Image (cartoon, rainbow, N blue to C red):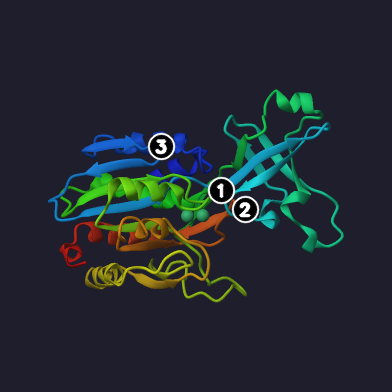
């Protein structure tokens, strides 16, 4: 399971350019499903036939945040615009990598006050001293992400893109394991979540599920002077009640809680006061789709050093497996 995590986090895949991740995932799941396809918005959809009671859509997003080049100056410095929720305070002095492996450092203009640190004060330096030289490697519209890194230390994983390759790895792992699902399962590895749950929107329209579960990371409130939040790293799978994009369907929430209790899987309740997941888009498709989110607790989200706990990760995997094989879903 951790092998998948390491493999998937290593792939380059800012929103709109999920092709490499698509191939990595396909590699792992081909042969384990009845049908596999990529839709027109770049969602990878794997279908696994079950006993046919219900059509269940599981969603984890393949894309990650990044930057897109907007301008190259005469001295060879590059300006950029964000792809998704990129924070200038985190970006500063980070190493960024392009699809072709070109590496650069984020520099910053002179600041009189740290409060003036905005994205437009930052530039990317790829080590070339003229526009002509830069243009041999990079064009306007090219994209870069945080340089890839993955460490396993104690019970914790520190890496970038755990948002949401951790979710992708859980889904792919489940697909490899599951023998006889009680329901028809659509494993959807979505595109463009970080720019507004766009892939999930078209995937839900195409599949028309009876109910859906997004699998994504969520923030924690367990670090010094953190914003108050009742999710802790190491305290189990987080069952989302609400975030800024969705209020989880009570039937799905309760089913997850019951299954966790019955099977001794550690879990916690999650209320996130910002952010959203693919559940936001799916629940609003058709005449409404009962939707919820299973969250992997994660510190330092959208940084190059996101952190999860392997025990939480395992709890999420167990709960997910129980969920898709549960007859309780018939009642929702
Ligand atoms: Co994100
Ligand atoms: Zn995410």
Question: Sequence order check: which comes first, mark 2 or mark 3?
Answer: 3
Secondary structure under tag 1 reads loop
Residue furthest to the front in view is 287
Kindly report the distance in space between the C-alpha atoms of the residues bearing marks 1 and 3.
16 Å
Kindly report the distance in space between the C-alpha atoms of the residues bearing marks 2 and 3.
23 Å
Q: In the rendered view, would you say 159 is above or below 312?
A: above
- What is the crowding at mark 1: few (fewer than 14 residues within 10 Å), some, or many (at least 20)? many
Residue positioned 34% across, 63% down in the render: 292
Q: Is mark 1 within 8 Å of ligand 1?
A: yes
Q: In the rendered view, would you say 102 is above or below 151?
A: above
- What is the crowding at mark 2: few (fewer than 14 residues within 10 Å), some, or many (at least 20)? some
Question: Sequence order check: which comes first, mark 1 or mark 3?
Answer: 3
Seen from the viewer's position, the closer of residues 193 and 265 is 193
Q: Tell me the number on the disc at residue 93.
A: none
Residue 173 in the image: state x and y as whole percent: 31, 47
Residue 201 in the image: state x and y as whole percent: 40, 50
Q: Which residue is mark 3?
A: 22
Q: Which residue is mark 1?
A: 65
């Amino acid at each position: 399971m951790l092998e998948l995590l390491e493999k998937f986090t290593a792939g380059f895949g800012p929103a709109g350019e999920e092709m490499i991740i698509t191939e990595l995932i396909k590699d792992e799941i081909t042969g384990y499903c009845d049908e596999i396809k990529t839709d027109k918005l770049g969602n990878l959809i794997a279908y696994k036939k079950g006993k046919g009671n219900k059509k269940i859509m599981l969603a984890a997003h393949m894309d990650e945040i990044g930057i897109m080049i907007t301008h190259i100056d005469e001295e060879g410095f590059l300006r950029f615009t964000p792809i998704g929720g990129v924070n200038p305070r985190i970006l500063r002095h980070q190493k960024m990598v392009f699809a072709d492996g070109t590496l650069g450092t984020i520099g910053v203009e002179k600041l009189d006050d740290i409060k003036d640190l905005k994205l437009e004060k930052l530039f990317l330096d790829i080590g070339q001293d003229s526009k002509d030289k830069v243009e041999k490697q990079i064009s306007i519209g090219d994209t870069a992400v945080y340089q890839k890194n993955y460490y396993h230390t104690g019970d914790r994983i520190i890496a970038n893109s755990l948002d949401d390759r951790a979710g992708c790895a859980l889904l792919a792992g489940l697909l490899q394991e599951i023998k006889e699902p009680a329901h028809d399962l659509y494993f959807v590895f979505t595109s463009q979540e970080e720019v507004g749950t766009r892939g999930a929107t078209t995937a839900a329209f195409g599949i028309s599920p009876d109910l859906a579960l997004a699998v994504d990371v969520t923030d924690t409130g367990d670090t010094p002077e953190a914003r108050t939040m009742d999710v802790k790293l190491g305290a189990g799978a987080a069952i989302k009640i609400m975030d800024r994009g969705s209020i989880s369907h009570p039937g799905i929430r309760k089913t997850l809680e019951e299954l966790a209790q019955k099977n001794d899987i550690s879990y916690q309740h999650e209320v996130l006061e910002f952010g959203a997941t693919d559940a936001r888009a799916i629940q609003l498709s058709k005449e409404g789709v009962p939707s919820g989110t299973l969250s992997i607790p994660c510190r330092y989200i959208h940084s190059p050093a996101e952190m999860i706990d392997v025990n939480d990760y395992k709890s999420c995997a167990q709960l997910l497996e129980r969920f898709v094989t549960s007859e309780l879903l018939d009642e929702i």
